[in-house]
Amino acid sequence: MQAKFSHLRKLYNAESLSTLKLAPALNLKSLNPKPTEKLIVNLMLRIFDRRNITALQQYGPTWSLDTSGTREFLNLVIQLWNILNVKHPLKGTRQRDDSPCPMTILL
């Protein structure tokens, strides 16, 4: 498996003229940031969005591309972001995802 940024660019190009988008967070600025914009977290979060994984899963077979590596990498980074970005002990109880739940060690 191999993750390719070109899969996300192809996804953006396919949906850029469409009114109904499976990956609405992708935009040209997040795919081609200027050197000063590479540190902006919101642009990074547009790349690592769960809807992009779903869109790649949908479009992959129609393009006859194996996007499983890209989808797996995006999912891994999203899970890591959710684990590291816990600021409140009850964050995971209000969401359907268990990864933002604070980790506790039982002795």
Image (cartoon, helix red, strand yellow):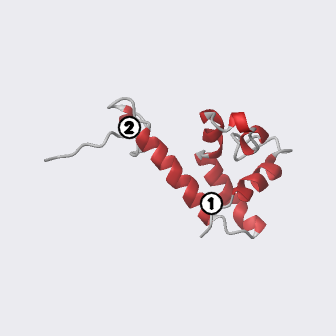
For the point 63% across and 36% down, the residue is 39
- How far apart marks 2 and 1 lie (CA) works out to 26 Å
Name the residue that disc number 2 marks: 92
Q: Which amino acid does label 2 sit on?
A: Gly
Q: Quadrant of residue 62?
A: bottom right
State how many labels appear.
2
Judge left or right: residue 10 versus residue 56: right
20 in relation to 87, above or below = below
Q: Earlier in the sequence, mark 2 or mark 1?
A: 1
Q: Residue 82 carries which label?
A: none
Q: Position of residue 30 (x, y in %)?
A: 71, 40
Judge left or right: residue 82 versus residue 105: right
Q: As drawn, which residue projects farthest toward the left? A: 107
5 in relation to 99, above or below = below
28 in relation to 11, above or below = above
Name the residue that disc number 1 marks: 70
Q: What residue type is labelled 1?
A: Thr
For the N terminus, the quadrant is bottom right
Judge left or right: residue 24 versus residue 85: right
For the point 60% across and 46% down, the residue is 48
Q: Where is residue 52 in the image (x, y as percent from the top left)?
A: 65, 49
Q: Nearer the viewer, residue 47 or 58?
A: 47
For the point 57% across and 53% down, the residue is 74
